[in-house]
Amino acid sequence: MAEANNPGAASGTINILWLNSAAEDWQSLWTIFEHHERDLCPGMEWSLIAGSTWASAEKAMGGEGIPVVLCESEPEPQSGAAATADGWRELLDLIRELPNPPVLIVTSRLADDRLWAEALNLGAYDVLAEPFNEAEVVRTVSRAWDHWNSSRKPIPPEAPEQAPDESAA
């Protein structure tokens, strides 16, 4: 079933986008994925793709190969065209526009009841507290991927473009 619904799964890899600017957080997640790869989805490899701007997130998600996005609740300020005032909320809006939107998990060092309620009410899948708890990351990410995989709609192949019929003129 994984291969039918996830373009990345056909190659045996499930891509997770981590949108965060802190290298130590990425290293922590990478270590968890590396140590628990067999627990996440047997027979599949997990790839953690790092991004630090909304533009990099949009580019990565455009290829339909990202089932789960992890995003810090309060990203570093950005300037220029990639700037955002609302962080994960704006990313959630961007995700909703995709044909098969990835699941969003918000991460936070200050993960309180207010953030959990707001994130879930607005459509995020879950909230992970930092520093990361290995068992919680494995449980949350694997369930998020299962949710995405079971709710994904097949996208029909694009019809080849046909040349205009000159005989009709």
Image: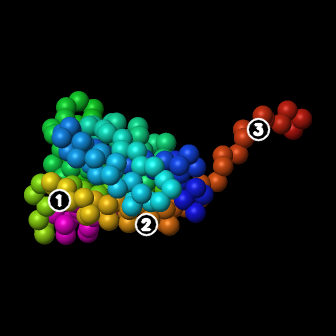
How dense is the environment of label 3, judged by Cα within 10 Å: few (below 14), some, or many (20 and up)?
Answer: few
Which amino acid does the dot numbered 3 rest on?
A: Gln
Q: Distance between the residues labelled 3 and 1?
A: 52 Å
- Residue 133: percent from left, percent from top: 20, 59
Could you tell me which residue is drawn at 49 percent across and 42 percent down?
Answer: 63
Q: Is mark 3 on a helix, strand or loop?
A: loop
Kindly tell me whether residue 81 is visible in this rendering.
Answer: yes
| Amino acid identity at mark 2 | His
Determine the residue positioned at 50% across, 67% down. 150
Distance, label 3 to label 2, CA atoms, is 38 Å
| Residue at the limit of the structure toward the right, as seen here | 167
Please name whichever residue, 94 or 134, is drawn nearer the observer in this view of the structure. Answer: 134
Q: Name the residue under label 3.
A: 162
Closer mark to the observer between disc 3 and disc 1: 1
In primary-sequence order, the first of circles 1 and 2 is 1
* Residue labelled with disc 2: 147
- Residue 122 colored in magenta in the image: yes
Tell me: 110 left or right of 85: left
- Name the side, left or right, on which 49 lies relative to 77: right
Q: Can you identify the residue that label 1 sits on? A: 129
Q: Residue 69 — which label?
A: none
Q: Is mark 2 on a helix, strand or loop?
A: helix
Q: Which of 36 and 99 is in front in this view?
A: 36
Task: Give the residues drawn in magenta, as a range.
Answer: 115-129
Q: Is residue 47 above or below residue 82?
A: below
Residue 163 position in % (x across, y down): 78, 34
| Secondary structure type for disc 1 | strand
- Pointer 3 or 1: first along the chain: 1
- Position above or below: 88 against 112: above
| Identity of the residue drawn at 32% across and 52% down | 35
For the residues carrying marks 3 and 2, which lies nearer the camera in this image? 2
| Mark 2 neighbour class, 10 Å CA radius: few under 14, some 14 to 19, many 20 or more | some
